C-alpha cells in the first residue's frame, strides 16, 4: 500500500504517547462492525438494507460496507491531519482549516467517487449525505457549497487523489461486483443507512475492542479485515447484541402467557393479531382497568415471533409510573422462559443502568 495512504491517521492515543491508528484500518474496523451487526439480524433486515440500493443482499453487502467504511474518508484532508501531526508527506498549506468537520469532507468526496463508479448522481449524493451525518450533524447546502471551493479544507489535488486511493483500496478488499442502478433514497432508506453507520462507528471506534494498528499492518488489509470481523463479533457479544431470537418460539394463547382468561379488549387484540400478515401499528384506547398493558405485552410477543422484531420500548409520563411499569415488564419478560441475558434498562434521571439475567 502506498506510504502516503498508510501514514494517514484516524485516531491518536489519549495517553500522551505518540501512538496512532491508520485511517484505512479504522475504516475497515467500522466496515467489519457493520458486517457483524447485519449478520446477527434477521434475513428480512438484510434484505431491507439491500433494498436501500435496489439490490439483492448478495450484491449490496459489499457496497453497504464500503460506503459505511467511508464515513471517515474526510479525515484524509489537511485540516484534520494537522490536528495532531501530518505524517502523510502531502503539503497541507500555510493555514489548514483545523476546525473542519471531517464528516462533511467525507460526504463531498464519497459522492464524487461513487458517481465516478457509475452511481446515479442523486443516489450518490444521498448515500454520501446519510453516511456524512454519522455524528448527528447534517451539512446544509450552503456549508457544502462553501467547502467545495475551500482548498484549506479539502486540500490540493494530491489530497483528492489520496481520498480516491483509499476508496480504491476498499474496493479491492470488499470487492463489490454489481453497480446499483437505483436512482434515489427514500426518507426511511436514509435513516436506516445513517443509523447503521453511527452504530458501526461507535463499536469500531472503541479502543477496548479494536486496538491500534501500525503502518505495517496496512501491508495485508485482507488479513486486517478478517481480524476486525472477529473483534466485531466479540464486541457484540460483550454488548449483549446477540442473534435475534424470539421470546417465544411457538404460538401461545393469552391464558398460557398470563394465566387468566382475556378480557374483551384483550381478546380483541388476540383476534386482530391472528389476522396480521405483515408488521403493523396497534393503537389501544380504553379506560383504566381494561388490561391494556397485558394486551400490549401479548402483542409484542406475537409480533416479535411472526415478524422478527427486535427490542421493546415502554414509555410512561412520570418517574413513578416508569418505575412501576419497569417491574411489570421485567416480570413479563422473565416469565417467557428465555435463558438469554435480558438487556433491560430503566431510563430516567434517577436510575442507574442494570442488566438482568
Image (cartoon, grey):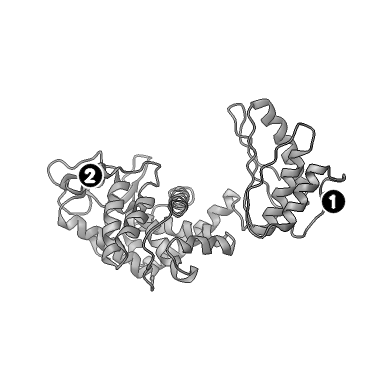
Query: Is residue 247 among what the camera can see?
Result: no
Residue count near mark 2 (Cα–Cα under 10 Å), binned few <14, some 14–19, many ≥20: many
Query: Residue 18 in the image: x percent, y percent?
Result: 31, 45
Above or below, comparing residue 90 to residue 312 in the picture: below
Q: Quadrant of the N terminus?
A: bottom left
- Image position of 134 with respect to 177: above or below: above
Q: Seen in the image, is 259 located left or right of residue 136?
A: right
Give the quadrant of the C terminus.
top right
- Compared across the picture, whether 333 is left or right of 58 comes to right
Provide the residue designation for mark 2.
79
Tell me, yes or no, if residue 225 can be seen here.
yes
Query: As rendered, which of 124 and 187 lies closer to the eye?
Result: 187
State the separation of the CA atoms marked 2 and 1: 63 Å
Mark in front: 2 vs 1: 1
Q: Residue furthest right?
A: 260
Residue drawn at x 66%, y 60% as measured from the top left: 277
Name the residue carrying label 1.
256
State left or right for residue 201 relative to residue 122.
right
Name the residue at 31% across, 52% down: 107
Amino acid at each position: 500500500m502506498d506510504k502516503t495512504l498508510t501514514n494517514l491517521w484516524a485516531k491518536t492515543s489519549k495517553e500522551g504517547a505518540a501512538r496512532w491508528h491508520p485511517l484505512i484500518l479504522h475504516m475497515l474496523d467500522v466496515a467489519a462492525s457493520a458486517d457483524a451487526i447485519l449478520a446477527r439480524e434477521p434475513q428480512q433486515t438484510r434484505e431491507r438494507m439491500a433494498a436501500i440500493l435496489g439490490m439483492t443482499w448478495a450484491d449490496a453487502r459489499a457496497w453497504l460496507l464500503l460506503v459505511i467504511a467511508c464515513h471517515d474518508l474526510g479525515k484524509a484532508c489537511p485540516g484534520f491531519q494537522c490536528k495532531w501531526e501530518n505524517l502523510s508527506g502531502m503539503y497541507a498549506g500555510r493555514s489548514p482549516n483545523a476546525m473542519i468537520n471531517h464528516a462533511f469532507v467525507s460526504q463531498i468526496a464519497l459522492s464524487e467517487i461513487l458517481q465516478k463508479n457509475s452511481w446515479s448522481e442523486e443516489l450518490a449524493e444521498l448515500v454520501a449525505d446519510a453516511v456524512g451525518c454519522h455524528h448527528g450533524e447534517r451539512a446544509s447546502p450552503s456549508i457544502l457549497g462553501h467547502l467545495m471551493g475551500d482548498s484549506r479544507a479539502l486540500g490540493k489535488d494530491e489530497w483528492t487523489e489520496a481520498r480516491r486511493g483509499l476508496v480504491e483500496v476498499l474496493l479491492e478488499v470488499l470487492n463489490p461486483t454489481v453497480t446499483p442502478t437505483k436512482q434515489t433514497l427514500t426518507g426511511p432508506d436514509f435513516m436506516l443507512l445513517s443509523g447503521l453507520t453511527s452504530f458501526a462507528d461507535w463499536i469500531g471506534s472503541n479502543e477496548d475492542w479494536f486496538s491500534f494498528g501500525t503502518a505495517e499492518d496496512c501491508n495485508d488489509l485482507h488479513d486486517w479485515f478478517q481480524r476486525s470481523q472477529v473483534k466485531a463479533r466479540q464486541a457484540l457479544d460483550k454488548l449483549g447484541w446477540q442473534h435475534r431470537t424470539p421470546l417465544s418460539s411457538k404460538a401461545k394463547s393469552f391464558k398460557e402467557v398470563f394465566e387468566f382468561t382475556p378480557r374483551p379488549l384483550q381478546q380483541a387484540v388476540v383476534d386482530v393479531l391472528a389476522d396480521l400478515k405483515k408488521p403493523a401499528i396497534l393503537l389501544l384506547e380504553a379506560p383504566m382497568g381494561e388490561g391494556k398493558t397485558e394486551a400490549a405485552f401479548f402483542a409484542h410477543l406475537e409480533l416479535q415471533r411472526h415478524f422478527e422484531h427486535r427490542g421493546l420500548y415502554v414509555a410512561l409520563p412520570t418517574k413513578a409510573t416508569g418505575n412501576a411499569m419497569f417491574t411489570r415488564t421485567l416480570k413479563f419478560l422473565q416469565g417467557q422462559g428465555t435463558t438469554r441475558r435480558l438487556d433491560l434498562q430503566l431510563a430516567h434521571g434517577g436510575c442507574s443502568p442494570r442488566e438482568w439475567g
